[in-house]
């Protein structure tokens, strides 16, 4: 995976000044998530992310969000904790093991007091 840091705006999920976050957005062609097998894979990934975050005790799983536009669909997972870097290091091996995933990006969002975020684009 080729990683690249950028500085985009803050998370659309709101302002959590007391927490940092890792936001994982998976992108799919329109209609892909209508496939039951693909949708089940998303829920399996969600269960894995939830368990890794719980077992590692680096944060909490905040949920997911499905979105659809005229040309694509996406699923976003929200992970919160005290240290976005530690959270990312826990989930990075999982993301690296998704070879068939064509498009996704990860945002490491630091405290709003720092006014910065980092994005890892794959």
Image (cartoon, rainbow, N blue to C red):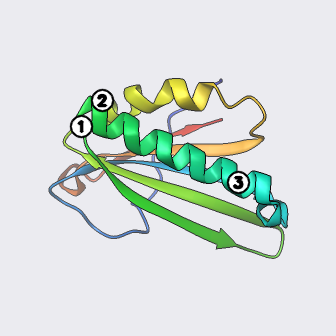
**Which residue appears at 39% of the width and 39% of the height?**
51
Q: What secondary structure is found at the residue carrying circle 3?
A: strand
Q: Is residue 99 left or right of residue 110?
A: right
Instruction: Find residue 18 and name its label.
Output: none
- The crowding category of the residue bearing disc 2, from other C-alpha atoms within 10 Å (few below 14, some 14 to 19, many at least 20), is some
Residue with the mark numbered 1 = 83
**Which residue appears at 48% of the width and 53% of the height?**
8
Q: CA distance from mark 3 to mark 2?
A: 24 Å
Q: CA distance from mark 2 to mark 1?
A: 5 Å
Q: Position of residue 4 (x, y in %)?
A: 56, 31
Residue with the mark numbered 2 = 86
Question: Which of the 4 image quarters holds residue 71?
Answer: bottom right
Residue with the mark numbered 3 = 27
Q: Position of residue 46 (x, y in %)?
A: 51, 49
- The crowding category of the residue bearing disc 1, from other C-alpha atoms within 10 Å (few below 14, some 14 to 19, many at least 20), is some
Q: Depth check: 29 or 45 in front?
A: 45
């Amino acid at each position: 995976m080729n990683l690249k840091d950028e500085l985009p705006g803050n998370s659309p999920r709101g302002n959590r000044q007391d927490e940092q976050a890792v936001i994982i957005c998976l992108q799919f062609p329109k209609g892909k998530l209508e496939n039951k097998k693909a949708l089940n894979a998303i829920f399996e990934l969600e269960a894995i992310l939830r368990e890794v975050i719980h077992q590692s005790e680096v944060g909490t799983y905040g949920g997911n969000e499905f979105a659809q536009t005229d040309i694509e669909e996406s699923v976003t997972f929200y992970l919160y904790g005290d240290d976005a870097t530690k959270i990312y290091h826990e989930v990075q091996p999982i993301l690296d093991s998704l070879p068939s995933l064509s498009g996704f990006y990860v945002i490491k969002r630091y405290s709003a007091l720092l006014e910065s975020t980092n994005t890892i684009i794959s």
